[in-house]
Amino acid sequence: MNAGSRLEQVLKSGRLAVTAEISPPKHSSPEGIINLARILKDWVDAANITDCQAAVVRMSSISAGIHILQNGLEPVIQVTCRDRNRIAIQSDLLGAYSLGMRNLLCLSGDHQSFGNHPAAKNVYDVDSVQLIQLVRRMRDERKFFSGEEIKKCEPRFFIGAVANPFADPFELQVDRLEKKIEAGAEFIQTQCIYDMERFARFMEVCVRRGLHERAYILAGLTPIKGLRSVSYMRTIPGITVPDEIVSRVKNARDQKAEGINICIEQINYIRKNIKGISGIHLMAIAWEEIVPEIVKRAGLRRE
């Protein structure tokens, strides 16, 4: 046991883990995320706290993580390479661990041109693979990125990374995932899955290479709220939404209900047909309160 987090314990036990995702607010009040923590705490094993996703300024993932931890929900804090150099990253990691954070997801971060400060300068002092490697070094070798010894109380995070089976070229995505696992990633959360045929091909290659035995892979799913949201998802690079799903939502009498039905069908399909999956990661963007219904109807509620 490296970090001793609930998420790590669940994955190592062999039970299918369930995680959700919470976006911190674009203001300084924690009221909304505290409310979400209370809604989700009995339904998921942990919740990702995004780090200024889409390069939009929000409450820090570490601060938001403290609020949800104090309200019974275990956080997975996201840390991007976009906004901090290696000094700031290490400083934040020491602080986060001291405050009780135990799960860490390492990301490059969306380019600042997508967000609300497009003229901001990026940093990228290290990339996501280097970040994974260096965090692992802090934990296992008790050394800072510079090589200096951490004399006591090294941060012992359960280390995660992301994978996108839908980015091109397809053949390189498994290679990139393997590179992250070799760097030290212990769990992987994927991009939103709508194209099951392509995801199945991706996982077939992962299983053939034994990557599912070297890291826990959680399948990322995003319930569709309506035609407007599914149309928006189709504009995001690296996400593919088949025409069949768009038609189902468009022709549904109740588009929200149909979106939930589709998500539950996807969970059941993955559990029944795709090997190598250790968990489900539900990214209900701005619709987090729907997660308990999906978890319940899909039979995923944790004991």
Image (tube, grey):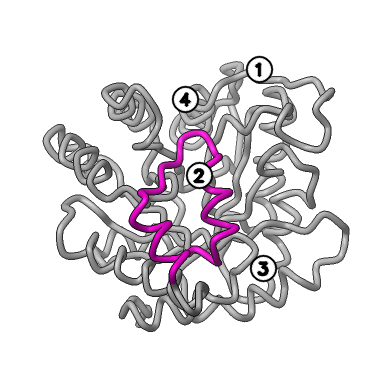
SS label for mark 2:
loop
Horizontally, is 288 left or right of 250 in the view?
right
Q: What range of the chain is rendered magenta?
A: 224-251
Which three-letter amino acid code belongs to the residue tagged 1?
Asp
Q: CA distance from mark 4 to mark 1?
A: 12 Å
> Which circle's residue, 1 or 2, is located before the other in the chain?
1
Label whose residue precedes the other's in the sequence (4 or 3): 3
Q: Are marks 4 and 3 in contact (CB under 8 Å)?
A: no
Q: Position of residue 160 (x, y in %)?
A: 45, 43
Residue farthest to the front, as pictured: 251
Tag shown at residue 74: none
- Which residue is at 43% across, 73% downward? 258
Horizontal side of 257 relative to 146 (left or right) equals left
Query: From the viewer's perspective, is the residue at label 2 or at label 3 nearer?
Result: 2
Q: Residue furthest right?
A: 28
The image quarter in which residue 260 lies: bottom left
The residue singled out by tag 4 in the image is 129
Q: List the residue tagged with mark 1.
A: 125
Amino acid type at mark 3: Ile
List the residue tagged with mark 2. 234
**Could you classify mark 1 by the number of other residues whose Cα lies within 10 Å: few (under 14), some (14-19), or many (20 or more)?**
some
Q: Position of residue 134 (x, y in %)?
A: 52, 26
What residue is disc 3 on?
A: 68
Which is nearer the N-term, disc 2 or disc 3? Answer: 3
Q: Is residue 68 above or below residue 253?
A: above
Q: How much space separates mark 2 and mark 3, taking CA atoms?
A: 31 Å
Left or right of residue 107: residue 35: right
Q: Secondary structure at mark 3?
A: helix
The crowding category of the residue bearing disc 4, from other C-alpha atoms within 10 Å (few below 14, some 14 to 19, many at least 20), is: many
Nearer to the camera, 44 or 97: 44
